[in-house]
Amino acid sequence: MTGRFDHLSHRRAIVDRRTLAERIAALPDPIPARLVPLLREALAQGRAEIARRLLDHPARGLEAAGGQAYLIDQLLRLLLDSATRLYPQAEPIALIAVGGYGRAEMAAHSDVDIGFLTAADPSPHAQQVVEAVLYALWDLGLKVGHSARSLGEMVRQAKADVTVCTALLEARLVAGSEPVWAEASRRFKTEVQAGTERRFVADKLVERDARHRRMGDTRYVVEPNVKEGKGGLRDLHTLFWIGKYVYDVDRARQLMERDLFTPAEYRLFHRADEFLWAVRCHLHVITGRAEDRLTFDVQREVAARMRFRDRAGKSAVERFMQFYFLQARAVGTLSGVFLAHLDERFAARGRRFGLPHLLPTIRRKPGKLHGFVLDRGRLALPRDDFFREEPVRLVEIFQLADLHRLEIHPLAMRAAARDAKLLDEHRRSPKANALFLDVLTSPRDPELVLRWMNEAGVMGRLLPDFGRIVAQSQFDMYHHYTVDEHTIRAIGLLARIEGGLEKEAHPIASAAVGQTVSRRALRVAVLFHDIAKGRGGDHSVLGAEVAERLGPRLGLTPAETETVAWLVRHHLLMSATAFKRDLSDFKTILDFAGQVASPERLRLLLVLTVVDIRAVGPGTWNGWKRQLLADLYEAAEEVLRLGHKQRGRTERIAAKQARLAEMLDWEEDRLAAVVARLPDAYWIAEPDDVLAHNVRLIDAAQDSLVIDAQVYPDRGATLVTIYAADHPGLFYRIAGAIHVAGGNIIDARIHTTRDGMAIDNFLVQDPYGRPFDDASQLARLRVAIEDALANRTKLTDRLVAKPAARPRADAFAIAPNVLIDNAASNRFTVVEVNARDRPALLHQLAQALFQSKVTIHSAHVATYGERAVDVFYLTDLTGDRIVASARLRTLEKRLLAAAAGGEVELAA
């Protein structure tokens, strides 16, 4: 029974079953429950030995997985032996391992999946044997998946449920009756397996696709699930299950004998299997539980355990994750090749599986295939050396696939992956570059075809700069995908915007892209915007240099190349301005418009910014960002169209007051009484709808405290307005109260009326970026603010005690940074604070500003995963900018201490 474990060295160092059996025999009453202390000790020692070996040889994942299965085998054999001696009347029982345990692969905390088989329905004595074994396993702290069936019931269940069938497919005898097991094996093959291959394959592929959708349907998420994710272990298992079911193989290497894998492909399979199992085993050891998700907080430790090292421009954890994604990509390639082989085999017998194509086949045959052929609607090669005869065909096959909306035959994809290196000598070919530009600028579905090019390695060979970012992980909580996947998704979104498919979600970007004349430049800019990540410098600047070098090679004109380089260099400018600056300060608009300098560049930059943010991942785009970008775009467009002229401040205020009068339709005296109380800065800062809401609130309040909250749909947030008697420290108390109530402040404008009342407007979201609008949330918010203003609670203690919304942020080292800028505004000192995001951050920063005796006029909060960027527009208490160097140094020191989470120094 140890044949599966012959590759394990020094098995008795893991567990010595003979010595354990002798110790058990010496017990006065060796019933299964009495064995537990001995077995618990053996389990702990065995796990420790396996963990030690894994640390010594961190890449030997299959050895660690086999060692764990061997350890459980020996404990089960002892338990079943004890139980059957306790109940000798029981009929013969076969104790089998099923699922991954049946394959003899387990991580330290994997489920122990077992089955008890009897020839007929289990007798009461057999049930007692089963219960005795199970109770002992549970006492050992193991998570057990189990079944107890007769052979007839086993067959019925396997026929009815593909999950049961799959588990039994890998079953093996651990202990007990060999005749029962032999009969079970025979009946499974003859009554379940025979003649059902086509249905089994179809069921497993449907199951795989559903699992992929559940896990995000991409193998390039930056916190992948090693077991269930796309490109993970389960995909390899699916290939093996299909091969075993159809061809009755026992080992993956036997798939070569059935010509389902070439030797090179089997090596890829084995390398990916070994690596993924090593990662999974390390995960279980580090976390002490059945953890299969490679989250940020463990990635660094797994990388260290697997001996990855820092390199110039790329940390050890980024190199580890890049290698992980390369293995995941190999799994995807193997899946396509394997299923294509299988499909061909069954097609030859007139029994095709009917595997789903990635694209619908065309309705009519294309007129020109340039030597390529169609194989049942899929673009295929006429002979195996077709690419070697003319390497430019490696690009042409993808251009034809896009042009005619064809799927590429998996065997042609395999040949492309094999021969992609031939492009090294042809990447300057005008024809190859023109064909690639055709795909990139396609009005059809460039995202899908570019992803195929990337999977085959063709993009990385044609554009080595792009090859450097293939599978490159971004070790932060903001980006959801690898750099190459992010880029390809952004190109796909751009194509949909250009095709008019995103008008509802992005009306301004859709209108802007229709007015652009530089569409080729825009597509290339999206391709290049992150191409220099991981090089150890400013990726925007380095990427612009790449664009200047590669633009002409791709066939762009000098003007187009200049535009692409500018867009890449400034692709973060618009989001940084919109999210970190006060758009009501006209100098912000003038400075931004001065950098952009032309309406065409403004349109291009808007669209690039939108697709860049959207392609980061789910939840990164919201109504608030849409509104800010729209406000900035419209203001800058007006400046660029009309020139650097603006209506005077007095005229702008008068125009807003006139529009307010129309909206309210109040008596002149009533409106004038409220208007007279509000300072000029207030009218400049707030949009018309907020002005109307505030004025109604002030008019009704009669100088009593008002806490109002209403959903602000255009911005995807809740507008929280506080009207209260102004006093020092009001802002930091309100900010702390909002966070205590579970809200995140994304924007704040602070005003004081001429008669000493505060009218403060906060935009608030929940931790998931949605409006803070649940009735219980709002009630909790009002109580928290009232308590804070009445000083009935110590906010700092409550905020520190509040659990972080993203505890994995602890995995990232973010050095606090404070930037003070007196040139960004004509009226305010602009302070930007970068720090790790946490519930108490804004409260502590505001408290530091209070201690520094400055006035906050507006606050703008942006979060990028684990990083928070809080920007404040300040003056001193007399309303002037803060210019004294000593005072600026003190302000910086206090904010740095607050950003680091330290206590704020009290003002003298």
Image: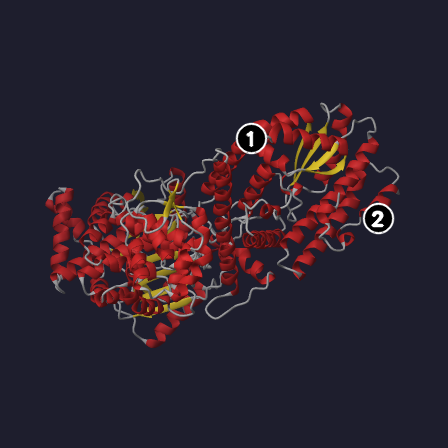
Tag 1 residue:
196
Mark 2: which secondary structure? Answer: helix
| Residue 461 or residue 227, whichever sits in front | 461
Q: Tally the numbered discs.
A: 2
What residue is at 26 percent from the left and 63 percent from the top?
555
| Residue 825 or residue 431, whichever sits in front | 431
Tell me where residue 395 sits by quadrant.
bottom left
Residue 821 location, x and y as percent? 30, 70
Tag 2 residue:
19
Tell me where residue 307 sits by quadrant.
bottom right
Q: Amino acid at mark 2?
A: Thr
Looking at marks 2 and 1 on the same chain, the residue that comes earlier in the sequence is marked by 2
Q: Amino acid at mark 1?
A: Thr
Which image quadrant: the C terminus?
bottom left
Q: From the viewer's perspective, is the residue at label 2 or at label 1 nearer?
A: 1
Mark 1: which secondary structure? Answer: loop
